[in-house]
Amino acid sequence: MRVFITSLFAHIFLNLYIGIRAWQAFPPKKIWRIPVLSFIGLEMLLYGVVYIFRDSLPDAIVHFGSLFCLSWLMAMVYFTIILLILDLLRLIHRRYPIYPRWVSRHYAQTKFILAITSIVIVGTCMVTGYLHGQKKIIKNVELTVQKENPEHKTLRIAIASDWHIGHIIQKKETQQIVQMINEQNPDIILIPGDILDHDLHIATLQHIDEDLRQLKAPLGVYAIMGNHEYRGWPDAKLRWLKKTGITMLRDSVISPDGTFYLIGRDDYTRKDVRKTIHELTEGLDTNKPIILMDHQPENLNEATQNGIDLAIYGHTHNGQVWPHGWMIAALKPMVYGTKQVGNTLHLVTSGIGMAGPPLRIGTDSEIVIVTVQFKPEKK
């Protein structure tokens, strides 16, 4: 409900701001103003209807309405950025005239040209962002852990975080992702949270658990809970996840073949009750490599201080759409990529799916294939 209220407030505020500025920019003729205001009014109505009556509406309407309204929300953000820049220039011009004479003499025409240009720019961003979001890439990363593993000189790990199975990632997309992972022939498959989106409806209706059962790796398939697993009906989601055949790690430690440890933390959503890394690593043989999955990259030092060799995170989506990544960077110690802190290698993936708008602008939907080399540090 909190997410809905926040999103509703953003829809109302940004729609009003953009609507007022569009009214000012377009010629005072019905042929221009009525379509703009009608579009904004219908979008707000659609948003409210879809999110209030989503459980009783046909899936096709909910699917279209959700993706359309969330995409428009992102478009409004871009329109707002453009308008704020133009407003800033206008304020500067009042004190220090910077506009060319033609602009001052043809101000109404200038506003109309800028309005059309803004629509073209934002429209292009939306189309290219949607098309790019449909592409899923394989990203190869090579890392070295300074420990010996007598059974494995290398370990090939497939990391696929943040699927968000729901109205964006459905059965067809899930099958594509499963095929892409299996084609990489990984030794082990890790899913650092957010397999599901906000509800189970699509996953249950389309029997997507059957597709996830097709994930294959010699050392197994393992996942942890993300923040989205705790939205809505977490117990029902956990029961469904168990049907997929994926081994769920919730504050637990396993050793898939006895040569290294894999730790799966519960999500940061449950920070007050989940175990500390110190508790999870207590009693482990620190001569063996230790790999940690933790959905949200919140405290990198905790992993480093407790002897983790490789810590794997998701959650951030690398911002998913520019400039969201900049906002996340102000809140998280790490947004994307790899980083070494002490003897610990930290890796944050942008994830394979999408949350909110079905767009990727400045980021990729990725499966990360990590080839870990085990090389003891020479003394």
Image (spheres, grey):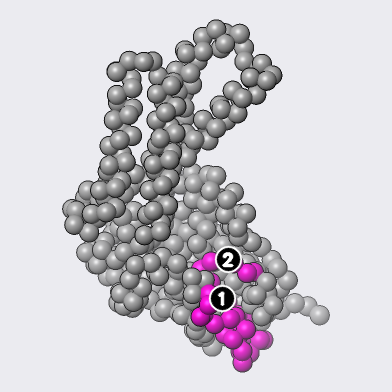
Q: Is residue 60 left or right of residue 186?
A: left
Residue 48's place in the image compared with 314, above or below, is above
Q: Earlier in the sequence, mark 2 or mark 1?
A: 1
Q: Which residue is mark 2?
A: 297
Spot occupied by residue 118 in the image (x, y as percentages of width and height): 47, 27
Question: Disc 2 vs disc 1: which is toward the camera?
Answer: 2
Query: How many labels, in total?
Result: 2
Q: Secondary structure at mark 2?
A: loop
The amino acid pointed to by label 1 is: Leu
Q: Are marks 2 and 1 in contact (CB under 8 Å)?
A: no
Image quarter in which the N terminus is found: bottom left
Q: Is residue 167 visible?
A: yes
Q: Residue at x 52, y 71 (%)?
A: 268
- Position of 144 with respect to 69 (left or right) is right
At x 51%, y 30%, the residue is 83
User: Which amino acid does the dot numbered 2 rest on?
Assistant: Pro
Would residue 187 be visible to someone looking at this image? Answer: no
The residue to which callout 1 is attached is 292
Residue 325 is a magenta residue? no
User: Which residue is depicted at the point 38% across and 73% down?
Assistant: 216
Q: Which residues are magenta?
A: 271-300
Residue 108 point in image, percent of width and height: 47, 13
Locate the C terminus and report the quarter of the image it occupies.
bottom right
| Front one among 48 and 206 | 48
Q: Is residue 283 on the magenta stretch?
A: yes
Q: Main secondary structure of the magenta part?
A: loop
Distance from disc 2 to disc 1, alpha carbons, whole Å, reads: 11 Å
Location of residue 59 in the rendering, given as x and y in whole percent from the top left corner: 21, 54
Measuring from the top left, give residue 130's x and y in whole percent. Answer: 40, 43
Q: Residue at x 29, y 70 (%)?
A: 209
